Image (cartoon, rainbow, N blue to C red):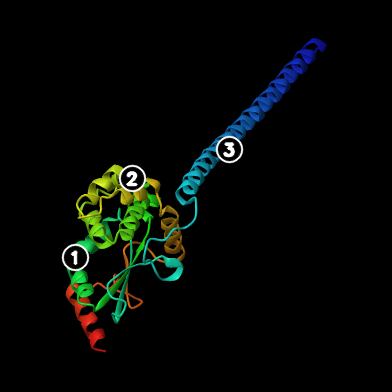
Amino acid sequence: MSEKNREGKRTARERLAAEREKHKAAEKRRRTLIVGAGVVCVLGLAAVIGVIAANAGKDEGSASAGPVMAPSGANGEDSLAIPVGKESAKSTLTIWEDFRCPACKSFEDAYRSTIHELTGSGQLKVEYHLATIIDGNMGGSGSRKSANAAACAQDAGKFTEYHDVLYVNQPAETDDAFAAESKLLELAGKVDGLDTAAFRKCVEDGTHNSWVEKSAEAFRSGGFTGTPTVLFNGKNIYQDQTMTPAKLKQMVEEADKG
């Protein structure tokens, strides 16, 4: 082989080697760009999450700012229960509810008249605890604001009536209508004597927001699976598939006889 041919082959090999190095360098740059882009996306997501968390924290802070002001007559641990009925009743029904919760409305529609009958006769005492689970699941503030308004109604001695009005007029779960104070004040007009300057100020100022948040925290830490949670003398009866208003009435009457 002539020197000229050997030189040509060597030059070709060098060109191929150089080309391979070029491809390796390009591939390395490509992988670096892909990894870098992935990190940017993750960091971007983290930033978005951080902004959301920060904003949520601000909203939460505004909701729970200030001292905890329990509504008039609230009792139980940390004064988180709104009592209805005579203290001397032998049976206690503990109800955790959210005014935006459709299942809570279904429970109220089915049991309302029976509960009113039993509390009116002095056989049953009900302790209402207010939760904000739908705000957490669906977003918005209607659960919190309606709970505050119900606490304001308790201050006015009109809790039961307003509680019932809220459920009868409950919007669709995805409709955060109770976040509008104007809607809550409009519904107060359906309860005789509730729509007063004091009630309006309580609703508009969010007087019991901190109390509502404390109640919501108690619900979250209580091991409950959802709303409504209904306990009869400490036993969860909402999970009982055979439970009916008639059966509840029978249980209360039996307990009343001792």
Pick the residue in front: 178 or 30: 178
Q: Is residue 233 visible?
A: yes
Q: Image quadrant for the N terminus?
A: top right
Between circles 3 and 1, the one closer to the viewer is 1
- Image x and y of residue 75, in percent: 39, 69
Kind of residue indicated by mark 2 = Ala
Mark 3 vs 1, N-terminal side: 3
Q: Residue at label 2? A: 179
Quarter holding residue 168: bottom left
Q: How many marks?
A: 3
- Image x and y of residue 153, in percent: 30, 57
Kind of residue indicated by mark 3 = Leu
Between circles 3 and 2, the one closer to the viewer is 2
Q: CA distance from mark 3 to mark 2?
A: 33 Å
Q: Residue at label 1? A: 110
Q: Residue at label 3? A: 43
**SS of the residue at dot 1?**
helix
